[in-house]
Image (cartoon, helix red, strand yellow):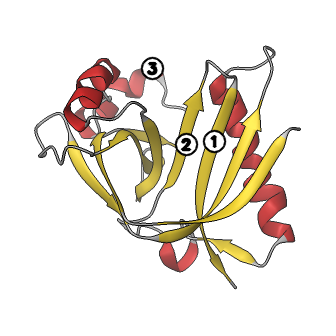
Amino acid sequence: MNYKTSIESLPEKNYLAIKGFMSWREILPDEYSEWERRYGFSNRNLIDQLKLKTGADEAYSLFCNSCRRDEQFDWVCGNDLACENNNYAPESEEFKIIRLAPSEYLRIEYSYGNEMTGEQAAKEADDYFWNEWLKNNPYKSKIEGDYANDPETADVTFYDDENRRVIQWHPILKI
């Protein structure tokens, strides 16, 4: 695996986001209408409008900014498409403001080949963080345990399909 890691301290960041949710288990076809009624599906066609409103060139995925236990769908977690809100654009029906507090982050850059998609590469990098890096370093993740559901904390992912790489920032705390 071709991982580059570093620890970075990032300042407060404000994003404008297209809210979305995902479940930890597969949503079955006969459950789609109930999922849509309760959580909706993010409208990914709004990304160009989001970039224009925010003045940002890149969109990120913010994961676990909000999670909750759901009896039918297991864990339902925020999986938002977001841009840094450089223009201080206001919220609207389509776009919501998300503030991330200053934090230390583990930055993982993972370069991948043609044998996988960006989503598969992001899963590989995520598995590396949870199954290897955290176990071998004196840190804990700030999206689990006492910090779970902190509205100002999220994993951030950038998909750079052109250069076949994924960059993730995982909020961490030294133990």
Q: CA distance from mark 2 to mark 1?
A: 6 Å
Vertical order, 67 against 146 (above or below): above
The answer to whether residue 83 is seen in the rendering is yes
Label 2 Cα neighbours within 10 Å, binned few <14 / some 14-19 / many ≥20: many
Whether pointer 2 and pointer 1 mark residues with C-beta atoms closer than 8 Å, the reply is yes
* 15 or 72: nearer the viewer: 15
Instruction: Give the residue displayed 19% in from the left and 32% down from the top.
Output: 53
Question: Which residue is tagged 3?
Answer: 29
Q: Residue furthest bottom?
A: 175
What amino acid is found at the position of numbered circle 2 in the picture? Thr
Number of on-image labels? 3
Q: Nearer the viewer, mark 1 or mark 3?
A: 1
Q: Of marks 1 and 3, which one's residue comes earlier in the chain?
A: 3
Residue 127: image location, x then y, percent? 75, 48
Instruction: Please name the residue that numbered disc 1 is placed on.
Output: 167
Disc nearer the start of the sequence (3/2): 3
Amino acid type at circle 3 is: Pro
Q: Which corner quadrant holds the C terminus?
A: bottom right
Please tell me whether mark 2 sits on a helix, a strand or a loop: strand
Q: Which residue is mark 2?
A: 157
Q: Looking at the rendering, which quadrant does residue 30 occupy?
A: top left
Q: Is residue 129 above or below residue 24?
A: below
CA neighbours of label 3 inside 10 A, class few (<14), some (14 to 19), many (20+): few
